[in-house]
Image (cartoon, rainbow, N blue to C red):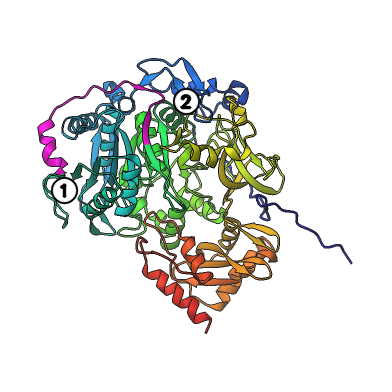
Amino acid sequence: MAEKKVVETTENEIAVHWQEEGLFYPSTKFIAQANMTDETIYDRFSLDNFPECFKEYADMLDWYKYWDTTLDTSDAPCWKWFVGGELNVSYNCIDRHLEKNRNKTAIHFVPELLEEKTEHITYQELYVRVNEFAALLRDFAGLKRGDRVTIHMPMSAELPITMLACARLGVIHSVVFGGFSGKACADRIEDSNSRVLITMDSYYRGGKLLDHKANADISCELAEEAGQKVDKVLVWERYPGKYSSKTPMVDGRDYSVNTILKDYYGKIIEPERMKAEEPLFLMYTSGTTGKPKGCQHGTGGYLSYVTGTSKYVQDIQPEDVYWCAADIGWITGHSYIVYGPLSLGASTVIYEGIPTYPDAGRCWKISQDLGVNIFHTSPTAIRALRKVGPDEPKKYDFEFKHMTTVGEPIEPEVWKWYQKEVGKGKAAIVDTYWQTETGGFLCSTLPGLKPMKPGSCGPGVPGIHPIIFDENGKELGQGAGKAGNICIQNPWPGIFQTIWGDRDRFVDTYFARYNTKPDSKDWRDWPYLTGDAAVQAEDGYFRVLGRIDDVINVSGHRLGTKEIESASLCATEVAEAAVVPVKDDIKGHVPDLYISLKPGIDITDAVAKKISDTVCDEIGKIARPRKVWLVADMPKTRSGKIMRRVLASISNEKDVGDVTTLVNPDIVKEIKQQYDNSKK
């Protein structure tokens, strides 16, 4: 009798069962306009040339004063970049483009309603509007360099105008995703000690005009209860000159921006000469576990990094029309809708609404109308468009040279649809891996140099040197076949400086795990812990499997949830998949697999069995789901993320908690009823 094979695992290792995909090469028509035909870039950004290699990114900016020290490690691991240098972000994103490109479109704002015209804001108009609002912030709101301001706004042209006005003054902005509740906003007001809240009266979503101002009243009330009083609420109007909220303005606290702006017509504000290491903004993590963390991003390092990566990874040039279909309220929007593209003098698209309004062809209609040639979105959005409008891209005349995915690992089957149907087999795809904390891309292929591989983000981008450790700090190298903690060996300019007001938490969360010399000033002793599980293939490409916590231990086998979800998508009927762990007395945990099917596919036991069998075929019988739940839709956040926590609560027969902030809370009751009925 053959000896039973023992799968040795640790808490931080996942045996990876899926096979690597084949390589895809960019179309011969793809011309890398940036530096991406120069293979020496990886040599220039090698560890041997660290940290001076990042001068290449910083030199893309205009500096009032050049820096003395590229990387200051004296307060490790709170890194300071380009110390001694002085610059202004607003100047770099606007003023320096005026001489040659003042009449070029900086922002295309697309309203959700089809009957409303797209607004094309030139760099000259952006300059005027940012200066006037900066004057209002300084002279009316009393904001000055180093103050914090909370911005709770939907997707609108006024949002980047507000951010750039803050940057012009040296005011630290904290943007809260427009879909977040008043309470979530209050938490961020309180933590950052903001005394000014900037908001908007209303915005469109799914064809409905939503009352956004109502959130401001809740935020101010709860923030004051927590000890932080908001003195002024500045309200932009969705329709200038017409207040569109049912929530009354509070006398002495709330002020219409559009009314007061008239007093600042033609005002010009000289940009503050900011030190490179001074904070630019706070970006709070969503706070799903514990208190939200205010990631503090600096001025010179952050802008250098997003400018450099926008050019080198996304190939953004001044002549491009670039659309990142994320939300500015997330780090992706900060880095790759606002600061990176505008620093490069490109035209950036901002769309107010949802990608399926009034139908699933809206993204491709916008792309055709504006001549978008670089498209950037999330696997969540791609899966949704594949589900509800798989044939829509064929109906529109657009051609992307380049497409980006961001936010989570993309399943190979979804990647292939994106490449074939959206990219029309011609566009280069970069599957990027990074985080709120990192400021910009960590891993990706470079479009003109490295072939693409579905499901793999690729190697570290120039200057980023990832390494995978097991729980004991031993490296799991190329082709190890096991996943561990993916870490970054070296600092980089885009990394956040600290957690606002909580340095100890910053060190403990991101650096203490593999640091053996707490007093060291040497960057080599401080690898950055991402908290994600990943595996490195023999060719050096990384495949990220999600958070280390997102694994299921089945009889000693550590299975990545993303691995099972990806396998299920190989069944042609599947549109979306979510895997959650369910406690099992014998096996420890078993996976429950929730599936939403493509339109027109009937929910049957045969389909469920086919999906279960597909998972077994792709991974092995160890991964067979306890149950395949075919559901009408997944519970989702306003940003389109599937709330796996809610599904896990249902499968484990626990309270699902507050689901009122979901975009579709009714689906939770429906799924729970489906679960309860199955037990009868």
Q: Are the residues tagged 1 and 2 within 8 Å (C-beta)?
A: no
**Nearer mark to the viewer, of 1 and 2:** 2
Label tally = 2
Q: Nearer the viewer, residue 257 or 363?
A: 257
Q: Nearer the viewer, residue 37 or 657?
A: 657
Q: Position of residue 224 (x, y in %)?
A: 26, 48
**Which residue is rendered at x = 59% and y = 41% of the image?**
458
Q: Which residues lie in the magenta part?
A: 255-281
Q: Is residue 666 above or below residue 65?
A: below
Q: Secondary structure at mark 1?
A: loop
Using residue 628 as the reference point, say whether residue 379 is left or right of it.
left
Q: Position of residue 339 (x, y in %)?
A: 36, 34
**Which residue is rendered at x = 35% and y = 43% of the image?**
191
Q: Which mark is residue 239?
A: 1
Dividing the picture into quadrants, the one containing residue 479 is top right
Q: Is residue 135 above or below residue 622?
A: above
Q: Nearer the viewer, residue 223 or 654?
A: 223
Give neighbour class at mark 1: few <14, some 14-19, many 20+ (Cα, 10 Å).
Answer: few
Residue kind at label 2, given as amino acid type: Lys
Question: Does residue 63 show up?
Answer: yes
Residue 483 falls within the magenta-colored stretch: no
Q: Which residue is mark 2?
A: 80
Quadrant housing the N terminus: bottom right
Q: Nearer the viewer, residue 98 or 56?
A: 56
